[in-house]
């Protein structure tokens, strides 16, 4: 089942979160393009169709703030689904559900910290003194959630995808799509973990680091570009795959 029928209309929060994640990946890809334009051309001002385009302003004043605001949607959806994913769906004899529940808990806290930091940035004065702490919380929990997501995907590949019986061409097609989706998510998390870890350290401790130790912007662009492309690829494959097959 594909297309509109693939959308789980019973869970508006999942749908909203999927749209937010896909939109965020596209925004981050555009932001990476701005960074590559600066790295390759050595400038940020470009003439385009008779207009002047400043990629630095576009990135700092529009794309990055919009990227941060999406965390509010992600955090809200994560909290709404918290009981279901971290309690109702957990089976004590199923390692996969325990891993998924733990991952969702870390992800929820990380996204919540990012959402609060966004609110502090946009005028919630009471949170302003805690921006650094919220940033460290967001990055540390995001790194842990990323590692756990990789573990979830590897467990799913080993126990569900590779060993599932293939009786028809449709079964084979679905197995290939599930394998591709899991691999794309693993790639996404590998690059996202590096972005969150090194980006978080550089943001929080940049002033205390030795001169010349800062990671070049091109490296962050490389990580961000690959993470965004893999995330968009995952979203496309997951859309084509449709909802899970009924057991």
Image (cartoon, helix red, strand yellow):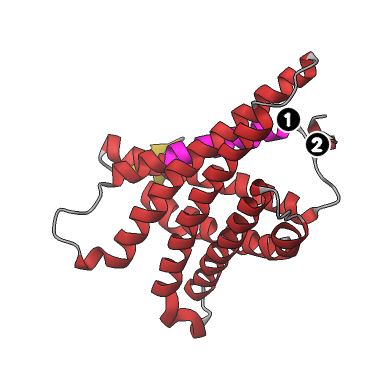
Q: Which residues are magenta?
A: 224-239
For residue 74, what is the image quadrant? bottom right
User: Disc 1 versus disc 2: distance between alpha carbons?
Assistant: 8 Å
Asked if labels 2 and 1 touch by Cβ distance under 8 angstroms, the answer is yes
> Which residue corresponds to the image point at 75% horizontal and 22% vertical from the top-left?
165
Residue 182 seen anywhere in this rendered image of the structure: yes
Residue 240 place in picture, x, y as percent: 72, 29
Check the image and report above or below for 94 versus 112.
above
Could you tell me which secondary element the residue under label 2 belongs to?
Answer: helix
Assign the C terminus to one quadrant of the image: top right
Residue 50 seen anywhere in this rendered image of the structure: no
Q: Which residue was labeled with disc 2?
A: 6
Instruction: Sort mark 1 into few (<14), some (14-19) or many (20+) by Cα contacts within 10 Å.
Output: many
Left or right of 32 in this view: 39 = left
For residue 246, what is the image quadrant? top right
State the residue lying farthest toward the bottom: 126
Q: Which residue was labeled with disc 1?
A: 241
Q: For the stretch drawn in magenta, what is the main secondary structure?
A: helix
Q: Nearer the viewer, residue 219 or 43?
A: 219
Assign the N terminus to one quadrant of the image: top right
Residue 93 place in picture, x, y as percent: 70, 50
> Which residue corresponds to the image point at 15% horizontal and 60% vertical from the top-left?
210
State the residue lying farthest toward the front: 93
Left or right of 49 in this view: 3 = right
């Amino acid at each position: 089942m594909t297309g509109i029928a693939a959308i789980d209309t019973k869970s508006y929060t999942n749908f909203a979160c999927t749209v937010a994640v896909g939109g965020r990946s596209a925004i981050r890809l555009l932001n990476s393009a701005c960074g590559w334009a600066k790295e390759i051309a050595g400038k940020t001002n470009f003439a385009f169709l008779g207009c002047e385009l400043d990629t630095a302003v576009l990135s700092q004043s529009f794309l990055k703030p919009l990227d941060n605001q999406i965390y509010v949607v992600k955090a809200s959806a994560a909290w709404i689904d918290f009981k279901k994913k971290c309690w109702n769906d957990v089976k004590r004899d199923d390692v996969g559900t325990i891993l998924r529940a733990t991952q969702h808990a870390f992800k929820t806290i990380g996204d919540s910290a990012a959402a609060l930091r966004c609110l502090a940035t946009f005028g919630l004065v009471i949170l302003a003194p805690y921006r650094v702490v919220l940033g460290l919380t967001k990055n540390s929990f995001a790194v842990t959630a990323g590692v756990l997501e990789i573990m979830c995907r590897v467990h799913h590949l080993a126990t569900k995808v590779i060993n599932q019986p293939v009786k028809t061409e449709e079964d084979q097609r679905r197995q290939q799509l599930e394998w591709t989706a899991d691999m794309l998510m693993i790639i996404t998390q590998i690059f996202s973990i590096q972005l969150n870890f090194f980006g978080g350290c550089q943001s929080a401790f940049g002033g205390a680091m030795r001169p010349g130790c800062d990671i070049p912007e091109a490296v962050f662009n490389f990580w961000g570009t690959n993470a965004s492309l893999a995330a968009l690829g995952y979203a496309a494959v997951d859309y084509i795959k449709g909802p899970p097959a009924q057991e």
